[in-house]
Image (tube, rainbow, N blue to C red):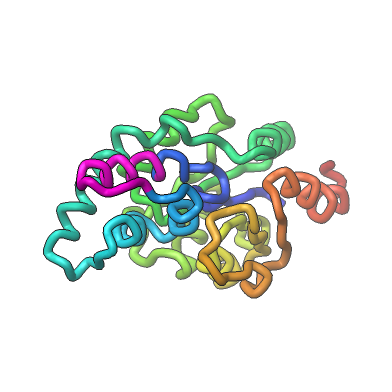
Amino acid sequence: MKAVLFDLDGTLFDTAPDFIVVLNQLRRQEQLPPLPDEAVRAVVSNGARAMVELGFGTDENHPDFPGLRQRFLDLYLAHLADETVLFPGIRTLLDELAAREIAWGIVTNKPATYTEPLMRAFAHLPAPGAVVCPEHVTNRKPDPEPVLLACRQIGCRPDEAIYVGDHERDIRAGRNAGMPTIACRYGYIDEGDDPANWGADHLVDSAEEIWPLLRALYLETAGQA
C-alpha cells in the first residue's frame, strides 16, 4: 500500500457542526425554529442543495431556492472551520502513515472554494499528496476519474491505494478505479441506507478502527508495520 485516499465530509472531518450552525442561523433569519442536529447531519454528504431543501422545504425549482442556497454558502464560507474537527482516530492514522512514508489524499465532491480554506485551517496535519475537488475533473464521484487523478498526483497505481468513504458513491468510485475500499458507518449516512450494502471490501464503525485495519491487512503482510 502506497496511499490512503479519503472522502472529506463525514470521513476525514466532522464538518456537520458548522453546517448545523449555519443552516439554523439562516432559518432564524427567516423566522423559523432550529432543526435538530441529527436531521442536518444525515444530509451533509449530499451537499448544499440537500441541506437547503431540508431547511426550507423547497427544491431547486422554487424561485426562492437560488437565493437561499447562495446565502447558505456565503455563511458557510465565513464559518467553515469554526466547529469542524477531525474524527477521533484520524490524526493518529495520518501520523502513522507519515511515519511510514505512505501518502494520503482527499477526493471530494466539495468544491475547492470550501475545501482549500478548510485545509488551510488544518495546515498542522501531515501534508496531503493530493486534494481533488470537482473543479479538477470532468466527472464527479462515483465516476473513478477523481480517484484516478489522485493516484497520478501521488504517483501510485490504483491497486496500491485504498479509498475510505461514508457514501455509496465513494465506494463505487474506488471500486470503479480498481482499488480496495473502506466504508465508514460513523459518517453522514442517509436515513434507511446501510453501508453494508455498498459492496466495500471493509466496514468500520469508527475512524479509530481504520489504522488497525490497514496495519493488519496491508502493512504487516508486507513487512511495513
Taking 8 as reference, is 4 left or right?
Answer: right
Count of picture labels: 0
Q: Position of residue 165 (x, y in %)?
A: 58, 57
Q: Position of residue 50 (x, y in %)?
A: 35, 61
* Magenta span: chief secondary structure: helix
Residue at (69%, 39%) from the top-left corner? 89
Taking 16 as reference, is 73 left or right?
Answer: left
Quadrant where the C terminus lies? top right
Q: Position of residue 41 (x, y in %)?
A: 48, 52
Does the image show residue 5?
A: yes
Residue at (68%, 46%) from the top-left corner? 207
Residue at (12%, 64%) from the top-left corner? 63
Taking 139 as reference, is 176 left or right?
Answer: right
Q: Position of residue 4 (x, y in %)?
A: 63, 49
In this picture, which residue range is highlighted in magenta? Answer: 20-34
Residue at (30%, 40%) from the top-left corner? 25
